[in-house]
Image (spheres, rainbow, N blue to C red):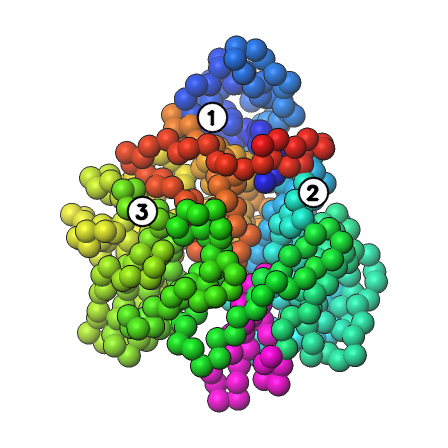
Amino acid sequence: MENLGRGLVAVRADDNKAFLLNSKVLKGGTNHMDETADFTKDNTYDVVPVVDGREQEESESWTLKADTDVEPLFRIPIRSGGPIRYLWVGDFDGDGEFDFILGRQEPPFLWKVNKDPNSEDQGTIESGSSTIDLRHADGVTVYDFDGDGVAEVTLKITNGVTLGDGKVFKYDDDDHQFVAILKGTTGALLATAPIPDDYILDGPTAPHLVVYMNNRQDGGDFNLIEAAYTYNGRSAKMEWKWLRGSQDAPDGHNTRVIDVDGDGLDEVIEIGFLLNGDGNLRYSLWPSGVVHGDRYHVAKMYPDRRGLQGYGVQQRNPSLLYEYYYDARNGKVIWKHYGDELSNVGCGMAGDIDPTFPEMEVWSFSGVYNALENKLTADTDEYPWPQLGIWWDEGGGTTRLLTPYRFGATPVDGDPIFQGDFLGDWREELIFPNADFNELLIFTTPIESDIRLYTLMHNSDYRNAVTLKGYVQSHHVDYFLGIGMETPPTPDICYIGSQGSNAC
């Protein structure tokens, strides 16, 4: 995984204090409140690691400019342009710091890919063959696919797409689509592999890269293909594909790539079924009455239960099933909740918001339930809106802590364009554009914490989740993160990148 830098930032917490992510060795939380700062001047901070009592090389510095406003964020100017729906992070030059890729209808800083006239029909379910940035089918992924320490950008392309270096991709027709691997710093094409054309007579597919593609039949039903690709630094190859065909395997609006059973191999999981890492179907939740729904979560919801657990909500299920909780390893449904009328539940959340129980809670609009016990919490009517949760402080309450729009945040679909721990203090950052779409607002917590965890971006399940989009959902780690948690084990990973250094 990425050999990341320290992620040092400082924001002005109030008129007399600066908060930064210090004079004493930090043995608790990885944050510090500076109560000596003179805000009429520039204040510069750096981090010096201490290993076995010896100081190591200091980090890059961060300067809090004079007269900085009191706000839990910092701002990055970008070129003016159209609305921004998504942002991805990746280390494109191997320096240990994350870089940004924006999805918008105007160019970003370094390079642009012109998706040609086949991408203009964004407002329909059956969009053009090279269309991306569709909310359900984002069509872009950022990751270091070949493990060389620098991230690549992958997206779907078709005939006529102009790439970041100005070259035009050519093919015999506009219908066949390809997975394209691009160089992160230039947008130049590194490799392509064909997207399966099994359902091409029904029109182009709309993929959640890398593994999910669907299109619509004339009768209104959706085809579905899952496929996995490898990139070795020279060429891209499809390893396997799975066609739903007539199988009862409900999908939703988000794909997860997660190791649900802890065997070191990732599985591909949808709202109603799971594929093993070799593309074979392990289970479907259809026999348990699950159909299509908008949102689901897979996480370590109960610390003492083996593997991971899942929670999902339903859209107009004929049986009136509203929500369900299940074992993500084998698909065994543990409990279900039914309503009294046909309903699109739409939103559902999972997180530890009740400190009286050592587990996560799950909720939609029918009350907050302790996940495993299926018991309503005492203040079940005080639930937060079940759309999106982040790790911001170290508490388990539901008090409002941040209102982004008051600082100029302007979401396109009501969601941040990025959510994730890309600065490294285990609490998560939120990124929004401003109203003029010429500035990124990066919100980071000003709240101190004594909890010390490794960066969430070095948790494999979490890192996979951060680069997947679809309908935006919270990201989860593969251990229980909540009140009363145990310190998670050091991740079994290799660090690759930062200025040529590799370490395992």
Where is the N terminus found, in terms of image quarters? Answer: top right
The mark lying in front, picked from 1 and 2, is 2
Q: Residues within 10 Å of mark 2 (few under 14, many from 20)?
A: some
Task: Indicate yes or no whether the magenta region holds residue 223.
Answer: yes
Secondary structure at numbered mark 3: loop
Q: Amino acid under label 2?
A: Asp
Relative placement, left or right, of 301 versus 153 is: left
Marked residue nearer the N-terminal end (3 or 2): 2
Return the residue nearer the eye: 73 or 331. Answer: 331
Disc 1/disc 3 C-alpha distance (Å): 30 Å
Residue that sits furthest to the bottom in the current view: 219
Q: Which residue is mark 3?
A: 306
Q: Which mark is residue 148?
A: 2
Secondary structure at numbered mark 2: loop
Disc 3/disc 2 C-alpha distance (Å): 34 Å
Which residue is painted at 36% across and 56% down in the image?
329
Task: Answer above or below: position of 11 versus 185.
Answer: above
Marked residue nearer the N-terminal end (1 or 2): 1
Q: Which residues are magenta?
A: 198-226
The mark lying in front, picked from 3 and 2, is 3
Return the residue nearer the eye: 46 or 478. Answer: 478
Which residue is painted at 38% across and 41% down in the image?
479
Where is the C terminus found, in terms of image quarters? Answer: top right
Disc 1/disc 2 C-alpha distance (Å): 29 Å
Q: Which mark is residue 30?
A: 1
Q: Position of residue 168 (x, y in %)?
A: 82, 66
Task: Indicate yes or no whether the magenta region holds residue 499.
Answer: no
